[in-house]
Amino acid sequence: KALESYNELGNKTEVANGLINLGVLKHMQNQFDAAYENYREAFKSGNELNDYGIKSICLNNMAQIYFDKGDYEKSVSLNYDALEIREIMGMEADISDSYLSITEAALKLNNSELAQETLDSAFIFCNKTENIEGIILYHKLMSELHAKKNNFQLAYNFLYWLRDVVLPP
């Protein structure tokens, strides 16, 4: 009903944001196709409005749908599209999130080289923006990467760091 009101007022930005929110709800309910449709429509509005923020959110959310469906290559591709917009806009906190999302998909694809490359970039932006959640995820993903490389001591060290930070004495 709110979307109809915004539509009647001609407020395309609010319609796009409403579609994104509706997509998030559908995504949480594992209604991937419906969520994707909402994000796609919001992305079209973002294009019409030339609103890079809306476009990057939609690309990021669509990438997450593909990740959740197991299409990790498509997830990486869409995350790179979102990353490109975020870099243009200087959205540093969101840049770190894009790199971390790419890393998660790269690990699923067993692409250690891509995972290492994107983790290195994520760490720089996480530290620069003091993104604590991102730094924690970085250490978790770094542990996974080293475990895939059969370097269990380094994998353990990254998790050990988390224990000290998340569960201080």
Image (tube, rainbow, N blue to C red):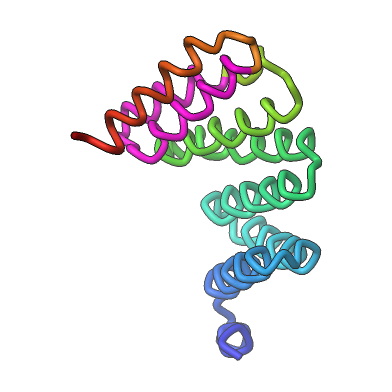
Count of labels in the image = 0
Viewport quadrant of the C terminus: top left
Image position of 27 with respect to 65: above or below: below
In this view, the residue in front, 60 or 42, is 60
Q: Quadrant of residue 11?
A: bottom right
Per the rendered image, the range of residues in magenta is 118-147
Question: Which percent across, then down, holds residue 158?
Answer: 42, 20
Q: Quadrant of residue 157?
A: top left
From the viewer's side, name the closer residue of 9 and 126.
126
The residue located at (57%, 14%) in the rendering is 146
Say whether residue 121 is magenta.
Answer: yes
Residue depicted at x 56% and y 84%: 6
Q: Is residue 121 above or below residue 18?
A: above
Question: Residue 64 at x, y = what percent?
Answer: 66, 48
* 56 left or right of 131 in image: right
Q: Is residue 106 left or right of residue 123?
A: right
Q: Residue at x 66, y 12 (%)?
A: 113
Is 4 part of what is drawn in magenta?
A: no
Q: Residue at x 67, y 63 (%)?
A: 27
Task: Provide residue 131's location: percent of width, then percent of height.
Answer: 34, 37
Quarter placement of the N terminus? bottom right
Q: Position of residue 160 (x, y in %)?
A: 37, 23
Judged from this view, the residue extending furthest toward the front is: 169
Tell me which secondary structure the magenta stretch mostly adopts: helix
The answer to whether residue 151 is above or below residue 10 is above
